[in-house]
Image (cartoon, rainbow, N blue to C red):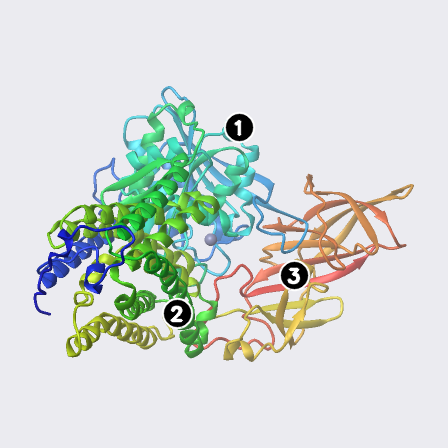
Amino acid sequence: MGVPPTRPADRAPARPGIPPTRPADRALSRPRRRLPAALAALAALLAVGAGVLVDLATPAPRPADAPADAFSAERAYQNVKVIAARPHVAGSAANDQVREHVVGVLRGLGLETEVQDTVAPEAGQLSGAAGGATLARVRNVVARLPGTDPTGRVFLVAHYDSVQSGPGGNDDAAGTSTVLEVARALAAGPRPRNDVVLVLTDAEEACLCGAAGFAADHPLAADGGVVLNLEARGSTGPVIMFETSRNNAKLVEAFGRAAPHPVGTSFAVEIYRALPNDTDFTAFLDRRFVGLNSAYIDGGAVYHTPLDVPAAMDRGSLQMHGDNALGLAREFGRTDLRDLGSDHDDTYFPVPGGLVRYPGWLTLPLTLVALLAVGALGWLLRRRGRATAGRLAAGAGLALVPVVAAPLGAWLLWTAVTTVRPGYAELLDPYRPVWYRLAVVALAAAILFTWYALTRRWAGPAALAFGGLVWLALFGVLLAVLVPGGAYLTTLPALAGAVAGLAALATRRDGPWPVLAVTLAGAVAVVILLPTVVLLFPALGMGMGGVAALFAVLLGLAALPVVDLLHPQAGGQRGLGALRARRLGALPAGAAALAAVVLAGVGLAVDRFDAAHPVPTHLMYALDAGTGTARWLSHEDDPQPWTDGFVGGKADVSDDFPGLGDGELRAGPAPAASLPAPALELLSDTRSGDQRVLRVRVVPQRPGVRLLSLHVDTSTATVRSATVAGRDVPVKARDGRWGFGVVFHAPPVEGVEVTLTLAPKAGQVNLRAMDASDGLGGLPGFRARPADVGVVGSHSSEMLAVARTYPL
Ligand SMILES: [Zn+2]
């Protein structure tokens, strides 16, 4: 690229309505030394991007001999190893041992510690699947560090139980060990002003029942307070403060001030509210607590699987959890908790070195200002003769093309990858996702660059830059209406781009200022949108990589005037010169497309399934002890070869095993094991008028039963009310023959008493009892997995269910 000749075009008086005569006049900036300007702008944006990535990196884990008042990941990790030595699902003997360890650690710190042993209903909308009500016997560990002059209580919360399918090294031995290490650091220092209560909950995985039982029934919970909930949904990555209570302004202010690594965005809060996920935090929100919910979420391939072992943990993530939790515990331990109320949510997002936040009520005014600024830019571009009205309109229309094409391309790319490697279907994210993520970003870049190379010459750089800003501003309006906490993502880059454009028009086009202005606007877009792209990949998984691609392309559109510098000066050339210019313009597009293909190929080559990274499979066994028939069941849509050896076509099993929930599963015949169904003991049966009251006890007959269910055939009786283990439960109807049911997790060996008040429709009432344990190893016909075949992280993986109908 040579140094283009300068033109005196800028100094010619512009007349409104007169279209420009030369395509060369259609850019926002036209530096005299184009190549150095392009390289400088690009280097600046890369440096800002690097700063953003460094800011998101986890801190180095602190050693075991770190000062006593500091959080040490190495000290915390010693507890992780004990807690996550093996799977410890609620109700299991392994979980009893974990609880004893946790109690021992807290008592060793000299804290008042007790175990809340109760029966609690679920929180949130988790179950529903099995219909009716869900409860659990829970044993929460609760310890208190009394404050000197309390204005309220701060609750540090994590769950100590794991899923049945894995030891929970990250989920949530990380949170539990963080709470223990924070408690140690707090106890080692001066006592805080407010009470600090440590709550290690039980049965989070089953039904959030531990947290629900604490929030509803524990005396320390009676007056509410501030909850800091600690979770993990992966094994690495930055800790993200992803959920808050409503009207969070004061809480977010404290978070920005007191968390040493404040990574959090109001966009995540809104995304999370829309997803069908729940944590213990939900149970506290149901009871009008306020607070913050934090988790690290990258490395999702191990989530809930046997691979979620302590060694899989990134101790930098553990350090980040602890630094933030300790900083926040101290902050809320000292502030006046009566003063945390607010009447609005904040918009907030991370920037290198801190957290930007502003009141949510600024969202709508800001979107309007951004729209007006983009409008003003369009008006001035036309007035200055940089673009005609027609070209501005065309620029806006054309800019929609990459916005649509990039997510579509990402979806097609992932479809192609999963066609080559179908095992990805059951994974939240591949084991080594980074290559695929980079491939999606490269693909988005290739689409943007190709589109730009094709349209630039005709529409002109200024009109296309304007078009990109139009969509950013319009997305801002859309987000402001649908997810206000995310409106900043496109509103602020649109505003910065429009202001930069206006500034560029106010100065000499061939001077340094236009380049500086568009580079600054590009930097704003990088700071705001790059963390979003980086964090959306682990948050949503590769299956929804299109969302990250969308934000990547929006980032590209916001930085379009900088992208333009990479191209030869628009227009001006004729003949061979024009041809060469077009070839050069196609260079970035070609390079990005090649990178996308190569990166996807590297991903496929590097991320193969092997013994350390097994392909996940799902299998259950369900026995009808009444008929003596059994089935293998799998929720895999397109079964892996190993699973294929057990199951065939889809079947609806909700009539036989209502406790497994609705929906079709793959099913295949299995040899019947001689295992007993739970017994149903009739304690009393009273009839008065049209009413019949049945009091029964459901008693597991096998060791290791994780859950029990009891369903009523509603063609034989209508359920008017029900009591389970002394608790009234809501009578919710479910579809199908078994129109009412209860599920009880972690049942005691002596069984669970259920009282049903019925309006009989027939002479006898049919009840169906089911229980479930974990592990298929000893079953007839079971063939062990080869080394490179693993277990899906799911609440029903390796479940063994036995059911029977009892007519009464
Ligand atoms: Zn979990």
Answer whether labels 2 and 3 touch (C-beta < 8 Å). Answer: no
**Residue flagged by tag 3: what amino acid is it?**
Asp
> In the image, is residue 339 above or below residue 428?
above
Question: Pointer 3: what residue?
Answer: 662
Query: How far apart are the alpha carbons under marks 2 and 3?
Result: 34 Å
Residue 604 position, x and y percent, is 34, 76
Residue drawn at x 37%, y 56% as measured from the top left: 536
Circle 2 SS class: helix
Nearest to the eye among marks 2 and 3: give it.
2
Q: Does label 1 or label 3 sit earlier along the sequence?
A: 1
Q: Is residue 321 left or right of residue 745?
A: left
Question: Pointer 2: what residue?
Answer: 409
Q: Could you say which disc has been placed on residue 686 in the image?
A: none
Residue drawn at x 19%, y 57% as measured from the top left: 46
Question: Pointer 1: what residue?
Answer: 222
Query: How far apart are the alpha carbons under marks 1 and 2?
Result: 52 Å
Q: Does label 2 or label 3 sit earlier along the sequence?
A: 2
